[in-house]
Amino acid sequence: MRGAHSDIPPELRQLAQAILDRLDPAVRAAAAAAAGRGGSPGKCQQVWCPVCALGALAQGEQHPMLDVIAEHSVALLTVVRAMVDGQAPPPPEPDGDGPGPPPGRYEQIPIVLEGLEE
Protein backbone atom coordinates (compact mmCIF):
# COMPACT_ATOMS: atom_id res chain seq x y z
CA MET A 1 0.00 0.00 0.00
CA ARG A 2 1.38 3.40 -0.97
CA GLY A 3 0.33 6.89 -0.13
CA ALA A 4 -0.68 8.80 2.95
CA HIS A 5 -0.68 6.88 6.22
CA SER A 6 0.92 3.78 4.67
CA ASP A 7 3.24 3.61 7.68
CA ILE A 8 0.43 2.54 10.05
CA PRO A 9 1.15 -1.01 11.26
CA PRO A 10 -1.41 -3.70 10.36
CA GLU A 11 -2.27 -4.34 14.03
CA LEU A 12 -3.11 -0.69 14.57
CA ARG A 13 -5.20 -0.66 11.39
CA GLN A 14 -7.16 -3.69 12.62
CA LEU A 15 -7.73 -2.07 16.01
CA ALA A 16 -8.85 1.19 14.41
CA GLN A 17 -11.15 -0.72 12.03
CA ALA A 18 -12.73 -2.62 14.95
CA ILE A 19 -13.30 0.64 16.85
CA LEU A 20 -14.77 2.32 13.77
CA ASP A 21 -17.06 -0.64 13.08
CA ARG A 22 -18.57 -0.28 16.57
CA LEU A 23 -18.56 3.50 16.77
CA ASP A 24 -19.80 4.35 13.27
CA PRO A 25 -23.39 3.01 13.63
CA ALA A 26 -23.86 4.81 16.95
CA VAL A 27 -22.60 8.14 15.61
CA ARG A 28 -24.71 7.84 12.46
CA ALA A 29 -27.81 6.96 14.51
CA ALA A 30 -27.23 9.94 16.80
CA ALA A 31 -26.72 12.23 13.79
CA ALA A 32 -29.90 10.95 12.15
CA ALA A 33 -31.80 11.44 15.40
CA ALA A 34 -30.48 15.00 15.69
CA ALA A 35 -31.39 15.76 12.08
CA GLY A 36 -34.80 14.13 12.36
CA ARG A 37 -35.59 15.49 15.80
CA GLY A 38 -37.48 18.41 14.32
CA GLY A 39 -38.58 19.36 17.81
CA SER A 40 -39.47 22.85 18.71
CA PRO A 41 -36.54 25.25 18.50
CA GLY A 42 -34.90 26.02 21.81
CA LYS A 43 -35.00 29.48 23.32
CA CYS A 44 -31.48 30.26 22.09
CA GLN A 45 -30.74 29.66 18.41
CA GLN A 46 -27.17 30.99 18.36
CA VAL A 47 -25.04 28.44 16.54
CA TRP A 48 -22.09 28.57 18.95
CA CYS A 49 -23.84 28.61 22.33
CA PRO A 50 -22.85 25.34 24.04
CA VAL A 51 -24.81 26.03 27.23
CA CYS A 52 -28.04 26.52 25.33
CA ALA A 53 -27.23 23.49 23.12
CA LEU A 54 -26.93 21.28 26.21
CA GLY A 55 -30.15 22.73 27.60
CA ALA A 56 -31.94 22.05 24.33
CA LEU A 57 -30.55 18.50 24.23
CA ALA A 58 -31.76 17.83 27.77
CA GLN A 59 -35.23 19.14 26.92
CA GLY A 60 -35.48 17.36 23.56
CA GLU A 61 -35.43 20.62 21.63
CA GLN A 62 -33.67 21.45 18.39
CA HIS A 63 -30.52 23.59 18.48
CA PRO A 64 -28.20 24.55 15.58
CA MET A 65 -25.05 23.53 17.45
CA LEU A 66 -26.36 19.98 17.88
CA ASP A 67 -26.94 19.77 14.13
CA VAL A 68 -23.39 21.01 13.43
CA ILE A 69 -21.87 18.51 15.89
CA ALA A 70 -23.83 15.63 14.36
CA GLU A 71 -22.85 16.59 10.82
CA HIS A 72 -19.17 16.99 11.65
CA SER A 73 -19.03 13.77 13.68
CA VAL A 74 -20.15 11.73 10.68
CA ALA A 75 -17.69 13.56 8.43
CA LEU A 76 -14.84 12.94 10.88
CA LEU A 77 -15.59 9.22 11.01
CA THR A 78 -15.62 9.12 7.21
CA VAL A 79 -12.17 10.73 7.06
CA VAL A 80 -10.74 8.43 9.76
CA ARG A 81 -12.18 5.37 8.00
CA ALA A 82 -10.58 6.49 4.71
CA MET A 83 -7.23 6.89 6.48
CA VAL A 84 -7.49 3.42 8.02
CA ASP A 85 -8.42 1.96 4.63
CA GLY A 86 -5.37 3.68 3.11
CA GLN A 87 -7.39 5.89 0.80
CA ALA A 88 -7.48 9.61 0.31
CA PRO A 89 -10.35 11.18 2.28
CA PRO A 90 -13.40 11.90 0.12
CA PRO A 91 -13.99 15.50 -0.95
CA PRO A 92 -16.64 17.35 1.06
CA GLU A 93 -20.15 17.16 -0.29
CA PRO A 94 -21.82 20.42 -1.26
CA ASP A 95 -24.55 21.51 1.14
CA GLY A 96 -27.05 22.28 -1.60
CA ASP A 97 -28.31 25.25 0.41
CA GLY A 98 -27.83 27.59 -2.49
CA PRO A 99 -24.98 30.00 -3.09
CA GLY A 100 -22.48 30.28 -0.26
CA PRO A 101 -22.35 28.44 3.02
CA PRO A 102 -25.06 28.89 5.64
CA PRO A 103 -24.19 31.26 8.50
CA GLY A 104 -21.88 29.78 11.08
CA ARG A 105 -20.45 27.12 8.78
CA TYR A 106 -16.86 26.73 7.65
CA GLU A 107 -16.11 28.38 4.33
CA GLN A 108 -12.87 27.49 2.57
CA ILE A 109 -11.17 30.61 1.25
CA PRO A 110 -8.45 30.14 -1.37
CA ILE A 111 -5.24 32.01 -0.57
CA VAL A 112 -2.72 32.91 -3.27
CA LEU A 113 0.74 34.11 -2.23
CA GLU A 114 2.49 36.14 -4.87
CA GLY A 115 6.11 37.18 -4.98
CA LEU A 116 7.47 34.34 -2.87
CA GLU A 117 10.30 32.33 -4.35
CA GLU A 118 10.96 28.74 -3.40
Image: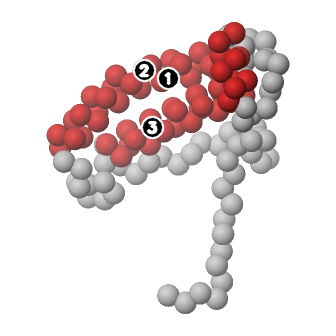
In the rendered view, does 13 fall on the left or right side of 118? left
> Which residue is denoted by mark 2 in the rendering?
25
Callout 3: few (<14), some (14-19), or many (20+) C-alpha neighbours within 10 Å?
some
Q: Secondary structure at mark 2?
A: helix
As measured in the structure, the alpha-carbon distance from the residue carrying label 1 to the one carrying label 2 is 5 Å
**Mark 1 is on which residue type?**
Arg
Marked residue nearer the N-terminal end (2 or 3): 2
**Mark 3 is on which residue type?**
Thr
Residue pictured at 65% horizontal, 43% vertical: 94
In depth, the one of 87 and 38 nearer the eye is: 38
In depth, the one of 57 and 5 nearer the eye is: 57
Where in the figure is residue 91, as x and y percent of width and height?
A: 53, 48
Residue pictured at 62% horizontal, 19% vertical: 34
Q: Is residue 21 above or below residue 107?
A: above
**Residue 78's disc number:** 3
Marked residue nearer the N-terminal end (1 or 3): 1
Residue at the outermost front position: 51
Where in the figure is residue 58, as x and y percent of width and height?
A: 65, 12
Q: Are the residues at dot 2 and dot 3 in contact (C-beta closer than 8 Å)?
A: no
Q: Is residue 112 above or below residue 4?
A: below
Q: Are the residues at dot 1 and dot 2 in contact (C-beta closer than 8 Å)?
A: yes
In the rendered view, does 75 fall on the left or right side of 1? right
**Mark 2 is on which residue type?**
Pro
> Which residue is denoted by mark 1 in the rendering?
28
Check the image and tell me how it is coloured: secondary structure
Quarter in which the N terminus is drawn: bottom left
Callout 2: few (<14), some (14-19), or many (20+) C-alpha neighbours within 10 Å?
few
Residue pictured at 69% horizontal, 9% vertical: 59
Which quadrant of the figure has residue 69?
top right
Where in the figure is residue 105, as x and y percent of width and height?
A: 70, 43
